[in-house]
């Protein structure tokens, strides 16, 4: 059975001088075409993930290309039975991927892009230092064999880690990878800035690798964390085995949910005991409202906003027919 929806992650480093005006135009286009997801805008470019009908996604990418004056937006698509977002949002940011280092411009310099079909040969070279540029909770559920984990909580921690752990005299060849490629645009530029001679990056990131390389030839182990309601995807880019704690947003397993530290919508092993009483009460009330809505058969934020939108549209058509 053909899957109904397309999810598309996209980014482009391009100078944008009118982000506030672009924000409203993009949000209007998303709403007009029933697209859900989040788009980030900054002076350095655009980044985000959207989901909806395939034709609407294709049209939206074309719309963005004209809007920002660039026809080579980096995109990665996958298909799903459900839309993995609840709302359409466009946010203004200082950076479209926050590393916090000035004078790093991926439009000027980045690492050498390596196609997924050649990635295995590169990272199997013992002289190449392979670095996972993602955060520790992402690395924890899946990564490439023998890749270095910087154990960062945020991408803004990466420059300090690189300064302390990448020695250009010792590490003359460095390969980096991330989820969709955007973090590597900055991390590889930074590695070159601190003096590494040869810097490589996985073209299109992990998602492109999983789509391109057959599983029996893959050096990937585990699942890949994604920033939407799927939480993680497997090698077939289908929803994986992880759930998410809605208090701290960390990925959790079925076994994690059996622990005494887990309370649905309120805490898990990662955040148990870290929330103040006010937050605990808010989480508890939110979960109560969700369960109450379910018992009444009503829509709520966790029920799939796209399907709710379709129902409302059908109801409007019915009302028009009665007038």
Image (cartoon, grey):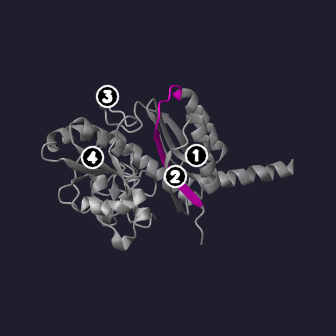
User: Which span is picked out in magenta?
Assistant: 5-19
Disc number at residue 290?
Answer: none
Which is closer to the viewer, label 2 or label 3? 3
Residue 276, relative to residue 312: is it above or below? above
Q: Name the residue under label 4.
A: 199
The residue to which callout 3 is attached is 102
Whole-Å distance between the Cαs marked 2 and 1?
Answer: 9 Å
Q: Name the residue under label 1.
A: 61
Lower position in the chain sequence, tag 4 or tag 1: 1
Tell me whether the residue at label 3 lies in contact with that at label 1, contact meaning CB atoms closer than 8 angstroms: no
- Name the N-terminal-most of marks 2 and 1: 2
**Residue 237: x percent and y percent?**
45, 63
* In the displayed structure image, the side of residue 22 where residue 263 appears, left or right: left
**Callout 1: few (<14), some (14-19), or many (20+) C-alpha neighbours within 10 Å?**
some
- Marks 4 and 3, how far apart at CA: 20 Å
Of 77 and 229, nearer the camera is: 77
User: Distance between the Cα atoms at labels 2 and 3?
Assistant: 29 Å
Judged left or right of residue 243, residue 75 is right
């Amino acid at each position: 059975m053909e899957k109904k929806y397309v999810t598309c992650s996209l980014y482009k480093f391009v100078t944008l001088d009118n982000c506030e005006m672009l924000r409203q135009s993009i949000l209007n286009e998303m709403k007009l075409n029933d697209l859900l997801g989040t788009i980030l805008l900054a002076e350095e470019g655009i980044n985000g993930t959207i989901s909806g009908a395939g034709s609407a996604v294709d049209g939206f990418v074309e719309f963005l290309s004209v809007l920002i004056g660039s026809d080579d937006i980096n995109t990665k698509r996958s298909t799903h039975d459900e839309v993995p977002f609840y709302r359409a949002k466009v946010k203004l940011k200082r950076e479209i991927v926050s590393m916090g280092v000035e004078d790093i411009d991926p439009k000027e310099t980045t690492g050498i892009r390596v196609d997924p079909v050649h990635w295995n040969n590169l990272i199997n070279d013992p002289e190449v230092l392979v670095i996972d540029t993602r955060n520790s909770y992402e690395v924890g559920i899946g990564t490439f064999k023998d890749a270095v984990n910087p154990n960062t909580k945020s991408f803004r921690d990466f420059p300090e880690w690189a300064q302390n752990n990448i020695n250009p005299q010792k590490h003359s060849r460095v390969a980096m990878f991330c989820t969709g490629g955007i973090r590597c645009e900055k991390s590889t530029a930074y590695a070159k800035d601190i003096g590494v001679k040869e810097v490589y990056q996985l073209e299109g990131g992990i998602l492109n690798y999983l789509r391109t390389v057959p599983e029996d030839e893959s050096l990937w182990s585990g699942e890949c964390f994604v920033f939407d309601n799927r939480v993680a995807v497997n090698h077939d880019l289908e929803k994986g085995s992880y759930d998410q704690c809605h208090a701290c947003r960390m990925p959790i397993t079925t076994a994690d949910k059996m622990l005494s530290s887990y309370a649905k919508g309120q805490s898990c092993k990662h955040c148990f005991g870290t929330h103040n009483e006010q937050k605990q009460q808010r989480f508890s009330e939110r979960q109560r409202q969700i369960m109450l809505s379910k018992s009444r058969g009503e829509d709520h934020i966790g029920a799939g906003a796209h399907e709710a939108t379709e129902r409302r549209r059908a109801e409007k058509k019915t009302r028009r027919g009665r007038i």
